Image (cartoon, grey):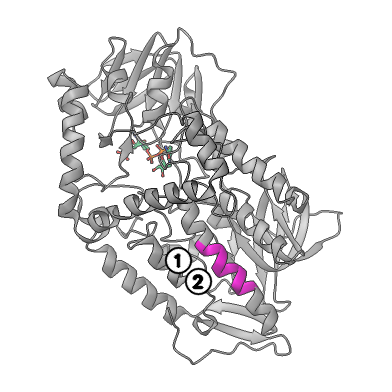
Amino acid sequence: MSRKVTDKAVDSRPTRHHKTIIIGSGFAGLGLAIRLSQQGRDDYLVLERGSDVGGTWRDNTYPGAACDVPSHLYSYSFALNPNWSRSFSRQGEIQQYIQAVADKYQVRDKHLFDCDVTSARWNDTAAHWEIESSKGSFTADTVVSAIGALCEPALPDIKGINDFQGEIFHSARWNHDADLAGKRVAIIGTGASAIQIVPAIADKVASLDVYQRTAPWLLPRLDRPYTTPEKLAFKYLPGVQRLSRAAIYAARETQVVGLAKFPALMQAFELIARAKLRYEVPDPELRAKVTPDFRIGCKRMLISNNYYPALGRDHVDVITDGIAEVRANSIVAKDGTEREIDALVVATGFHVTDSPTYDTIAGRDGRTLSEVFDEIGQQGYKGSAVANFPNMFFLLGPNVGLGHTSMVFMIESQINYIADALATIDKQNLRTVEVRRDVQDDFNKDLQQKLSKSVWINGGCASWYLDKHGNNTTLWPDFTFEFRRLTKTFDVAAYATTPVSDTSRTETKVGASQ
Ligand code: NAP
């Protein structure tokens, strides 16, 4: 997909203006919409390209899709759900939860669904954003990008793949009309999505070829259904659910010490993972193939109890020779072996540090996010602002990602920050706010210094956490409560501002507080 900032599309519909436009309505955009409604900041609109809320949980409907973070933590703090059916929720239940929250807080009428934003361009003279979309033109004083990092499927550049004649689809665009029963199926990739798909389809297919480039580390999935007494306790004794949430949070947070600060400590997890491998993969040949060669945690640690057993089945093959080409009805491995297939599942992840959406957003000097990131790397300030993009905020921007705990915690921290930013703009009567480049540079120097000690840099793997310069521009390298502290209030001193009455930019000279 190629989308560029284009001249204003010819559109007879009048341009509509809103104080704030939010792009995207997954956990992040929806959460901010709810906060703005609660604060009475009603002049906002959410533009969502899908036909419902939910984001990644609406889009990832592949068989076996489920969350790796326990349900009681993977939910909004202001909308706890006592009715989770099990400790780790599946996609359908999470999507129903998000839909129910949108209904409860009555924000659906603040959404424009099936509205694909094709460009957002800052107009420095008018000091507003100009947005083009499949549903016409908009202007806004402030824009919040809540697009998320895992929304643009990455398709592998493999010779012949476009000429494949059977069913072919990406894991995040599962074709439910394609019946895989009795078919010869191949899957490319062994990441978080693939390890859920493989056991979910292994029973019904005639054969399953798993094309593995890098073996992932797997830990046990401590998933179980909640009992009726537990659910009653969650419902009638809210403290119990809060306590469960706090315990999950604390347990997960301890992983930061190994992941970000002392990677050698990750060996403790490696011991568990190796024991699991020995127990669940008795065949030494297969075990050798699926044993990772990097420090656990360097790539996302995966959890599954049924992936290895599925790989051990007679009609499932793990192929590690690499793919030379895809033909009309087969895949040829680099050792020359050709294997016939009827369907191909592409579970190769997402454009994270090179999202095509970056081509569609142009800032103060007309340069797009892609062009700016090309020069300096995918850098921002507190994951929430990027220099050169005035009056624009980001939910799930650079270095906000996590591999070990709930993204909803990070999202709620950013909602605090951005909601306070919007309130500050009103209170101080500001025309523009733009994070200062020197503040952003200092922030990133500090981030990269912290990251240099992490397992993501030192663990001996390549991963989507790293950009093309080898920098980790996706993950938060510290405790999440530290991020919560940094984003508690909007630090206007870190921003260059102009007042409403003045059209020239003023640099605030006060040192930025973090
Ligand atoms: P991913 O983690 O990026 O995995 C992509 C897989 O495809 C990797 O095994 C990768 O191999 C392989 N691959 C990529 N390009 C390839 C190529 N050209 N040829 C051969 N193999 C190729 O993607 P994902 O599994 O969709 O997961 C993405 C993220 O989504 C996760 O990290 C997680 O944050 C989230 N997620 C979460 C859950 C959950 O909570 N349970 C489930 C699904 C996804 P290499 O390792 O060698 O690059």
The image quadrant of residue 83 is top right
Circle 1 packing at 10 Å, graded few (<14), some (14-19), many (20+), is some
* Stretch in magenta: 413-422
In the rendered view, would you say 440 is above or below 88?
Answer: below
Say what amino acid the circle numbered 1 marks: Arg
Q: Nearer the viewer, residue 34 or 461?
A: 34
Q: Residue at x 32, y 50 (%)?
A: 251
Report if residue 115 is visible in the image.
no
Which disc is residue 501 wearing?
none
Task: Report if the beta carbon of the residue with label 2 is closer than 8 angstroms to ligand 1.
Answer: no
Q: Nearer the viewer, residue 509 or 256?
A: 256
In the rendered view, would you say 300 is above or below 451?
Answer: above
Answer whether labels 1 and 2 touch (C-beta < 8 Å). yes
- Residue 468: x %, y % from top left: 34, 55
Dominant secondary structure of the residues highlighted in magenta in the image: helix
Q: Residue at x 86, y 54 (%)?
A: 13
Q: Which residue is mark 2?
A: 488
Circle 2 packing at 10 Å, graded few (<14), some (14-19), many (20+), is some
- Locate the N terminus by quadrant: top right
Q: Which residue is mark 1?
A: 484
Residue 61 forms part of the magenta stretch: no
Q: Residue at x 20, y 51 (%)?
A: 459
Badge 2 element: loop
- Residue 109: x %, y % from top left: 78, 50
Task: Report if the beta carbon of the residue with label 1 is closer than 8 angstroms to ligand 1.
Answer: no
Q: Is residue 447 left or right of residue 127?
A: left
Badge 1 element: helix
The image quadrant of residue 426 is bottom right
In the rendered view, would you say 474 is above or below 318?
Answer: below
In the rendered view, would you say 73 is above or below 201?
Answer: below
Q: Is residue 212 left or right of residue 20?
A: left
Residue 421 forms part of the magenta stretch: yes
